[in-house]
Image (cartoon, rainbow, N blue to C red):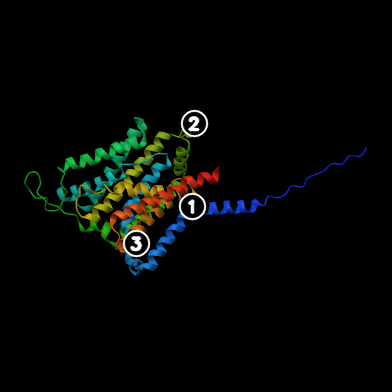
Amino acid sequence: MTTTQSTEVPTKSATAPATSTAVRVQNAVIKYGFIFVTVALFLYFALSEGSFRESATLLDTLRYVSVAAILGLGVTLTMAVGGMDMSVGAVAGLGVSVAAQTMVVFNQVGAVAIIAVLAAGALAGLLNALLIVVLKIPDMLATLGTMFVIQGSKLILVDGQSITPGMTLDDGSTAPGRFTAGFLKIDRGTVLGIPISVLVFGGLTVAAWVFLARTRWGRVLYAIGANPEASRLAGIRVGAYRALAYVLSGVLASIGGLILAARIGQGDVSAGTSQLLEAVAVALVGTSVLGRGRPNVWGTALGAVLIGIITTGLTIKGLPYYTQDVVEGAVLILALVFSFTLSKRRSS
């Protein structure tokens, strides 16, 4: 008895090529979309406004964003361990006050002021580490508390007044010092035509990238951010590494404060207040670059450049400052869509 088996030849779905193409397009949008947006905005402003194309304008744009970018690098480090440093703006402002106090009131040289500012930033980072690691306070709440303490303390120390050369002190005498010429070069000086603050921004970006992407410490920080409990079980000293991230963030914020102090040339009590939102924004924007969906140094740097392009371009076009905030907010939302909404759809 002979039996025959009927075999069905599987047919290829007509929608398979279309689906495959759609997936590739979506992946390309997630990976390169934000870079495309940055390049497109740059070309738009460059082609529509002649002054935007000038090298001086481009360097001023980088100089303008250098403070927010450096603070954003600190935020990126804390995001790598699953946290968020909300005190970076206050620490930068503290650096401005400490620099002014050191040089104007105590009549010290710029080198002493730099050491004092860096030490103040490290101490602020240690305070955050104490609150988060030892006292187990959630990162965002702890750093918000630090932010308010620092902002209030620096106002108390100077009676709510900005520190300026020649000001009258509490005892009736005149402040003997001033911002030294060497210190002011931190923001106002150039090397081969490039502002020193831009060189500092570039150097710190490379250093932070090497630290996070090319060293064991950086890989451990990412591991802690991904799964702190698994890291602990693997023998990693999670608390020590989280403390390291916040101390480094404090030091980076103080470097931003040094640049800000050299830019302002006085101990403005409101300095650094507006830097927090920009620093957090550029760090969040950076998570969308190349579709990585996680904090990364080059993404933060590109986010800062994008914010600078938008601000400079809209300023040249004469748009009011409040419209710039709307555009920057829209760009941040777009970046978050790339980082979370589209990337989750790709992974699902």
Kindly identify which residue carries mark 2: 233
Residue 209 pos. (x, y %) = 43, 50
Q: Please state which of the two labelled residues, at mark 1 or mark 3, is closer to the viewer.
A: 3
First along the sequence among labels 1 and 3: 1
Work out whether residue 33 can be spotted. Answer: yes
User: Residue at the bottom extreme?
Assistant: 50
Q: Is residue 239 above or below residue 155?
A: above
Q: Is residue 19 above or below residue 230?
A: below
Kindly identify which residue carries mark 1: 290
Report if the CB atoms under discs 3 and 2 are less than 8 Å apart.
Answer: no
User: Residue at the left extreme?
Assistant: 172
Q: Is residue 307 above or below residue 44?
A: above
First along the sequence among labels 2 and 1: 2
Q: Please state which of the two labelled residues, at mark 2 or mark 1, is closer to the viewer.
A: 1
Seen at 43% across and 52% down, the residue is 298
**Quadrant holding the N terminus:** top right
Report if the CB atoms under discs 2 and 1 are less than 8 Å apart.
Answer: no
Neighbours of disc 2 within 10 Å: few (<14), some (14-19), many (20+): few
Seen at 10% across and 46% down, the residue is 169
User: Residue at the top extreme?
Assistant: 135
* Front-most of residues 169 and 68: 68
Please state which amino acid type lies under the numbered disc 1.
Leu
First along the sequence among labels 3 and 2: 2
Neighbours of disc 3 within 10 Å: few (<14), some (14-19), many (20+): many
Q: Quadrant of residue 64?
A: bottom left
Kindly identify which residue carries mark 3: 313
Please state which amino acid type lies under the numbered disc 2.
Leu
Residue 250 pos. (x, y %) = 32, 43
Q: CA distance from mark 3 to mark 2?
A: 50 Å
Work out whether residue 119 can be spotted. Answer: no
